[in-house]
Amino acid sequence: MILGLDGLRAIAFLLVFACHTDYLLVGWTGVLLFFVLSGFLITGILNSMKTRLRGKEFFIKFYGRRFLRIFPLYYFYLLLMLGVAAILLGVGYRMNYMHEFYRQVPYAFAYVYNFFYASSTFTQHKFLDHFWSLSVEEQFYVFWPLLIFLTPDRWQKRLFLAIILLAPAFRLATVYFLRSGMFPFFTSDIPLGLYPLPWTHMDAFAMGAYISRYELPRPKLQFVLLLLLVPTAGFVSQYVSSGTLTPSGTLMDLTSLGYTFPIANAFKHIWGYSLFNYLFAVLIYGVARQGWFIRWLEWKPLAYLGKISYGMYVFHFSMTWFAARIRDVVPMSEDLAKPLTALIAFLATLLLASLTYRLLESPLLNLKDRWFATYSAVNTTVTSRSPGSAQA
């Protein structure tokens, strides 16, 4: 088990939560941290399994373990929300919102919600919006094992570097095709349409994969320089392109660090992802391989939050919607409603994630080594706690 990674998961979730409760505009990048972590962990698992398993056994056991980790909570949430929406429709509450949920939920069931998110018919829905990233993760799990299995070990470094270097070109090509109008299915808002597509984030997974196997030179120096470079590049490019650091005229804009979602100005949707992905890759490398910040990341409340972070992520956005309904019952000022909504949403999410982890996730996770143990008849060393596994 790799120390500190649960703490990083917690930080990734807290970034997203702070964004969705309007406290930190740059918090959307927490999703990128999740992606880089996935690349790091899954590549470590796959390479470990590859040394012990062959052919069909490799894929059956990997996908079997993924199934137990991902699907039960995912589909439990969708079925739960179908029931909640039916009840709310029955009492005539927010009927248009509930009908919109029913229109969108088939895309989530099919794990293609990210493509719907990029479509011209997409409208925001807090029961489902965040599921675009879970769709991207699942699509990564489909093709990445095959790529790792077929690529000889000696070529993996070149593979990861090629994906990292080609990712901005893929984003640029996608912008061109979206602007061409050849695909009317997609939204005309180019940065928003680009954001949820799986190939937009392929460098995040590849950077995570790279640091799972290879060294980074002078990581501390790189990390400090990136901490300076990321906000500097964000603010400077925003000012040059728009003439202001606060496009909406409020100081809240400064919490975006110049990367207001969906980072439309100064071509940030081409290079901005790479910059954040590399920052997070260096951070993960330092934590996992050099022990940075372990004392803080292993703080029990933070580590626990990271352990249940999947459930926290799944439930949190719908809980912010329900918490905000307090304004329908008790009229109050925005200064009071905003923090109260965030507090109620966080506590409700924590309760639900804790319960589902204890009653649903944990019992099924315990079956992974019983049903899909990653060992062979020749070598009976179980690899479920090998480097890069840490509850991936």
Image: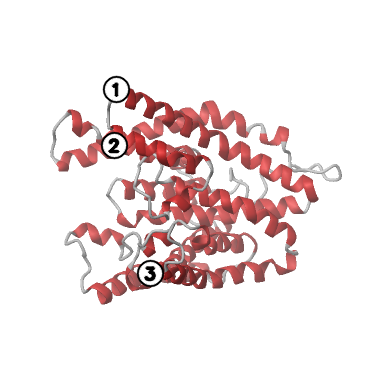
Q: Residue at x 75, y 53 (%)?
A: 50
Label 3 vs label 2: CA separation?
Answer: 32 Å
Circle 3 sits on which residue?
268
Q: Indicate the amino acid at tag 3.
A: Lys
Work out whether residue 268 or residue 19 is closer to the camera in this orientation and state it.
268
Using the rendered image of the protein, determine whether residue 17 is visible from the camera's viewpoint: yes
Label 2 vs label 1: CA separation?
Answer: 27 Å
10 Å neighbourhood of mark 3: few (<14), some, or many (≥20)?
Answer: many
Q: Indicate the amino acid at tag 1.
A: Val
Q: Residue at x 35, y 60 (%)?
A: 262
Give coordinates of residue 331: x percent, y percent: 13, 33
Work out whether residue 173 or residue 263 is closer to the camera in this orientation and state it.
173
10 Å neighbourhood of mark 1: few (<14), some, or many (≥20)?
Answer: few
Which element carries disc 3, helix, strand or loop? helix
Give coordinates of residue 26: x percent, y percent: 34, 57
Circle 1 sits on which residue?
91
Which element carries disc 2, helix, strand or loop? helix
Work out whether residue 234 or residue 175 is closer to the camera in this orientation and state it.
175
Q: Residue at x 81, y 41 (%)?
A: 380
Residue 147 left/right relative to 247: right
Circle 2 sits on which residue?
343
